[in-house]
């Protein structure tokens, strides 16, 4: 009976919502949902960029923005959770190594999709702001490694171009990222 009830309640639920819920419920068991959400995010960004010329429906833009933000928040939590998982990081099994490699590839696609969304002049301003901050948050992924040059370059270019968000981005960079000597040194080339 309970199985029927849960099936019935999720029948009208979009696939991405179910994937999002499953991924948050058990990140390792439902890791394939990460791949689905990254792919779905790519498709949403493509649709935004393709329809950018149109004077699109404002309600549709809000719906897309809401969907993108939900997916981005879920993926960010997932990636951070997997990287914080001591068992996976310390395991020497081949399966763990393959899973972590696959996860790194998903992070790269995720970050590339976010940057693409931010760069386009067709991206609505509110969605652009959300994805810019997601790129900034994603710099923290793969902690313990050297910083991610592509994402830092991207954010620094936005600051230097005088974007509306430049001051806020500069404040966040100053308080959270420039305290690391390698990031501060690298960033000096933009002065």
Image (cartoon, rainbow, N blue to C red):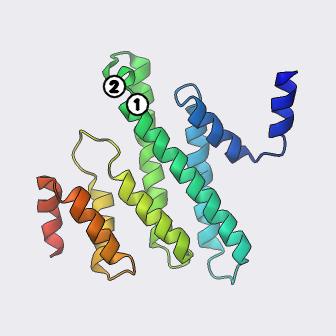
Of 163 and 43, nearer the camera is 163
Is tag 2's residue or tag 1's residue first in the polypeptide sequence?
2
Q: Position of residue 104 (x, y in %)?
A: 40, 39
Disc 2 residue crowd, few under 14, some 14–19, many 20+, Cα 10 Å: few
Residue at 27%, 70% (x, y): give it.
170
Disc 2, disc 1: CB below 8 Å? Answer: yes
Against 81, residue 69 (above or below) is below
Disc 1 residue crowd, few under 14, some 14–19, many 20+, Cα 10 Å: some
Residue farthest to the top, as pictured: 93
For disc 2, the marked residue is 89
Q: Quadrant of residue 66?
A: bottom right
Of 4 and 109, nearer the camera is 4
Q: Position of residue 123 (x, y in %)?
A: 55, 74
For disc 1, the marked residue is 100
Please state, as top left, top right, bottom left or bottom right, where the N terminus lies in the image.
top right
Residue at 31%, 76% (x, y): give it.
167
Q: Secondary structure at mark 1?
A: helix
Residue at 28%, 52% (x, y): give it.
148
Measured Cα–Cα span from mark 2 to mark 1:
8 Å
């Amino acid at each position: 009976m309970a199985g029927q009830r849960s099936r019935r309640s999720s029948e009208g639920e979009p696939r991405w919502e179910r994937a999002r819920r499953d991924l948050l419920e058990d990140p390792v068991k439902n890791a394939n949902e990460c791949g689905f959400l990254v792919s779905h995010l790519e498709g949403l960004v493509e649709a935004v960029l393709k329809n950018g010329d149109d004077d699109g429906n404002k309600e549709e833009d809000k719906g897309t923005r809401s969907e993108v933000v939900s997916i981005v928040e879920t993926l960010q939590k997932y990636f951070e959770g997997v990287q914080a998982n001591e068992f996976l990081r310390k395991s020497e099994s081949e399966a763990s190594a393959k899973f972590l490699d696959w996860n790194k590839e998903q992070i790269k696609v995720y970050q590339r999709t976010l940057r693409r969304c931010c760069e386009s002049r067709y991206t609505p301003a509110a969605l652009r702001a959300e994805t810019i901050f997601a790129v900034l948050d994603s710099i923290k992924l793969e902690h313990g490694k050297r910083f991610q040059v592509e994402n830092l370059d991207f954010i620094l270019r936005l600051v230097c171009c005088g974007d509306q968000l430049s001051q806020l981005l500069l404040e966040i960079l100053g308080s959270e990222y420039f305290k690391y000597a390698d990031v501060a040194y690298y960033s000096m080339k933009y002065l």
